[in-house]
Each structure stands twice: as structure tokens, then as C-alpha cells.
Amino acid sequence: MASPDAPLRWKHLYKVLTKAGPFSDEDWVPGQETITSLESSKLLVIGAGGLGCEILKNLALSGFKDIHVIDMDTIDISNLNRQFLFRQADIGKPKAEVAAAFVERRVKGVKITPYVGKIQDKDEDYYMQFKIIVCGLDSIEARRWINSTLIGMVDFEDPESLKPLIDGGTEGFKGQARVILPTLSSCIECQLDMHAPRPAVPLCTIATIPRQPQHCIEWAHQIAWQEQRKDDTFDSDDMDHIGWIYSAALERAKQFNIPGITFQMTQGVVKNIIPAIASTNAVIAAATTSEALKIATSCNPYLENYMMYAGEEGVYTYTFEAEKKPDCPVCGNLARNLTVDSNMTLEAFIETLGERPEAQLKKPSMRTEEKTLYQRFPPQLEEQTRHNLKLKLKELIADGQEIAVSDPAYTIDFRFRLAFQ
Amino acid sequence: MKQQQQQAENAEGAAGKKKKKVTAAQLRVQRDLQELTLGSTMKMTFPNPDDILTFTLTIEPDEGMYKGGAFHFSFVVNQNFPHDPPKVKCTQKIYHPNIDLEGNVCLNILREDWKPVLNLNAVIVGMQFLFLEPNASDPLNKEAADDLRLNREAFKRNVRTSMGGGSVRGVAYERVMR
């Protein structure tokens, strides 16, 4: 709550929230109500690393009071140069917990609830409690997961079920911030092709004609390890393993007269490390948090919907509206509810799909997350799933479960949530 | 108050939704499998039909130097497909310029030239092509590539020897005849 003796800290924030600006919506009401809505907004931050530390600090200093943070990692010594919520004594401790405690200590009145674990540990009930979700992740896989989870949660009867996703990402001097309104705007999956592919060297170059020190390291990692240490699973965090790769690479480099291999380079190549730049994180985190502030308070229009930042040559930034992909496998076709007789056989159910007015699925293949219900091609899989056709739906699917259907006649796939009569 | 009520309703509704959803990778593989054109020289086997992300492809060339063989490849598709390419390995020890003794395969679209717009069919066509036209300029088995480049007839003989389970240059190969 804002009180007359509110600390000086919030003075400038309250200026923005208690007075309409040139870009504010005409219907927006500045004042106490807006401040209260900011302070009561419950936010989730995914990731407490380079971006996450910045985001947590920024959100707390923007007036948010109820922040949750989720991260599965522990603190490593190499994090300390930029992940400023961590100290040497914190090495080995979970990032989410240390970051939460640090920000709570420094910004009085903010409550930060950490969860140490994977985002996949949590279900829709958990994500439903937040107003906005801010991501500072380094993995495309995790982004795709939270994106499809949030899209699956949207219930058009209930506006509260739509959770804006603000995604920040950095790689060296480059970064991006984007705002995703699940089902309404272009999603992570729509934009999947925009990610630059991981640069890779042809395997035959590595195997036969190395030219660079990195090729020798790749050789040791991809080929020599398999040949000579078949029974050990390679662990890029195990210093003995990295050491082995390093000496194997050195040996090979000597044969081919290639200078320049270092232990650090070995670690970088094997772990696919792109040096993180603290100021890139700061720029991108600032963009994501100001979007969170604008969405939570409606004080100013939010980003529609993609901001790219290129700092490798001077400074360049550009904002554009990424479009929804009509055949996006995640947001292109949302799950429809379908009430079915649980005693119906799969075969009979498939027949009813062929008669549906919106999409006549004549040759569908379909599955649940854990089960291939029926797959028409290749023939071996058709044979292996054919017996399911005679089974009743209740023997294959749980009440309320989602199935995904592909049909060669459509370039887009379909999802149905089956409710039993 | 209204919000609380809504939250309670949401919680109820969510109880039925807790089942996991088909992932984007699974959905894409389901579609890719459906769009395959395998022909008579290729077969697929699924050790667990419910897991369509893990399977074996068998190529039985009906022409070229590798005619008469049956070559097995394991495919593992991860949850980051199609951003990541499928991981493909030959499960037999074979004599081939573009496949090493550990089963690694040198095919550009499996590594440096992979793009999410490519699909499993593109990979399978590429694999088939390796047996019709082994390529000496992308060597992974350097001896085999040298043989192919320097003496094509000798290379052909070596292929036949290796496919029958014989040794070439002191390396014993697996018998892969159909």
C-alpha cells in the first residue's frame, strides 16, 4: 500500500502511475487503484541466472510486491561476474533461493517465493495463480514448454486464464524481448524458425581434415570419446572428463600442426558456451520488466510484440510485430472439447471424426502424450497400433485427456479434449 | 471476491486437465511419419510403438554397390525437434566412406545444414542416397574414402567382402547380407 510516508524510492514510479501521459489510454484511470493493482499483481520469473538476477531486481524496484521465481540450477563460480545477487559463499546453493533472499533483504516490503526445480514439475494450477510470466531462460526447449502450457490454459470464458508471457533472451552482444499474449499473438512456436541454428562443423571435417583448434576439440568430444571411453557417459561438468578431452585434442592438434588449444577453449567448445555479456542482460531485462510494469498497470501501451537488440557493431535495435503462423502446431489450432461415449471403439470414434463439419478427417493418425492410439503410416507402426481400433475409448484414454490428430488432407494438426458422457 | 470465486472454478476445471498434453515434437513426428515415402527398400521398426521418437530404419538397397545388404540405423528425436535434428547412428560396423566404425554418419542435413523446415523424409532420402552414391569427398572412414577415390573397382570388392562379414585392411566388419 502506498502511504503518505512511502519511501522516496517510489516517488518517480508514482509520478508515472498517478498522472496520465501522452501515450496513456484515454480510459485509463491513474491513481491509487493503479498502484494497488501493481502491488497486488503476482508475477512469476522463470530463470534466476544472468537475466533472472536483473529481472528480479528490476521488478522489485518497479514496485511489484509478490514475485515468485523458479530455477533448477545451483550457483557456479563462473556466474559471479554478472549474476550479482550471488557471492562466493553461495557457490553450490540453489540460485532461486539465494536470489530471492538477497532481493528481499535489499528491497523492503517485497516478497519473493523461490522454487528450486524444473518448470515441468508444476502444473496448470500453479501457473494459473500468476498475472504475468517473465522468462529469462537460456533454453529453447523450456521456452517451448511454457509457451504451449500457457496456450493450453486459455479458456475464452475466463479472461483471467490468459497469462501474458514476456520472454527475454541474450546471446553475447545480441538479445531480444518479446511479449506473447497466448492464443492472441504470435507465439514462441510460431517464431521457432527465427532462431539462428547452432553453428556446426561438418562431421567429416572434424574426422579427417581439421583446420582449427576447435575442430580438434570437437574430434576428441564427438569421436575419440566414443571410441576409447564407450562405457563412460560424458559429463561436461566433470573436470576430469574435460581434462581428458583437452589432452586428446592437444595430441590431435600436434599431429596436424594446429596451435592454440587451451583448457578454457575446450570447456567452451564442449559446453557450447557463448560468452555472456552483463550489459546485454541488463538491456534485455530492462525491456522485459518495463513491459511487465506497463501490462500490470496499463499506464502505457505495451510492446507489440518483438524487440531485437544488436550490440555487436555499435548499437542497433528494432521493433516489429511478428505474425501468428496460421499452421502453428501449438497456437494454430486450439484444443476443442468433444463429448464422447467412453464405450465407443476407437474405430467408431475415428469414423465420427470423418463426419465433423469443420474438418472432415478421413485418414487421421492420433495419439495422447503417452500412447500412440493409431498411426496410419509407416506400415510397421500401423500394424502395431491396429489392435487399438477395436478397443473402447475408456480403455485407451482418460476422461478429459487431450488427443492430437494429424490428417494428410490438412497442413495443420487438430487437438481434441475428450470428455466422457 | 469475484476473483476468488473464479480461481476456485479454475482449480476445479484444472483437475481434469492435469493429464499431459501431446508435445510439439511428438505432434511434428506424428505428421512427419505420416508423410514418409518409404518405398520397398526401407522399413521402420518401433521397439515401443507408443514412443514414436525412437525407432530403427532399415535400408535394403536394390541397386548400387551395397545391393543385397540390410543396414540398420537408430533414430532418436528429442523434445527440441524440429529445432534440433534427429540423432542418427548406424548400429552395425560397416565399410562406408561416410560412416565411421562407431556408426557416426556424415550427412550435411543431420548436422550443419539442418533446418526446422526439413522433415524426417528428407533425412531418410539422404540416408538412402549415401548407399547409392557413397561420397569420397566427405570422408568419415578415411581408408574407405581413399579406396573409393583411388581404385573404384577395389573399393567395390572391399564393399562385398565387408558385407559378407570379412576383413578389409585388418578391420573385421559385420555381416550385413539380407
Image (cartoon, coloured by chain):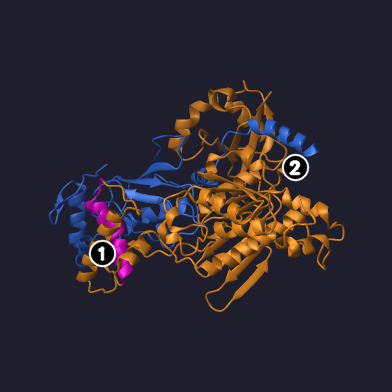
* Residue B109 % position (x, y): 42, 59
Please identify which colour was used for chain A in the image: orange
Question: What range of the chain is rendered magenta?
Answer: A212-231
Q: Residue at x 63, y 23 (%)?
A: A342
**Magenta stretch: dominant secondary structure:** helix
* Residue B168 % position (x, y): 15, 55
Q: Can residue B77 be found in the magenta stretch?
A: no
Amino acid tagged 2: Phe
Please identify which colour was used for chain B in the image: blue
Amino acid tagged 1: Ala
Q: Can residue A220 be found in the magenta stretch?
A: yes
Identify the mark nearer the N-term, 2 or 1: 2
Q: Residue furthest left?
A: B170
Q: Which one is nearer the viewer's eye here, A254 or A413?
A: A254
Residue under numbered circle 1: A249
Q: Which one is nearer the viewer's eye here, A244 or A150?
A: A244
Q: Residue furthest front?
A: A5
* Residue B141 % position (x, y): 24, 59
* Residue A58 % position (x, y): 63, 60
Badge 2: residue crowd in 10 Å (few <14, some 14–19, many ≥20):
few
What is the count of numbered marks? 2
Q: Is residue A117 left or right of residue A204?
A: right
Query: Does residue B16 appear anywhere in the picture?
Result: no
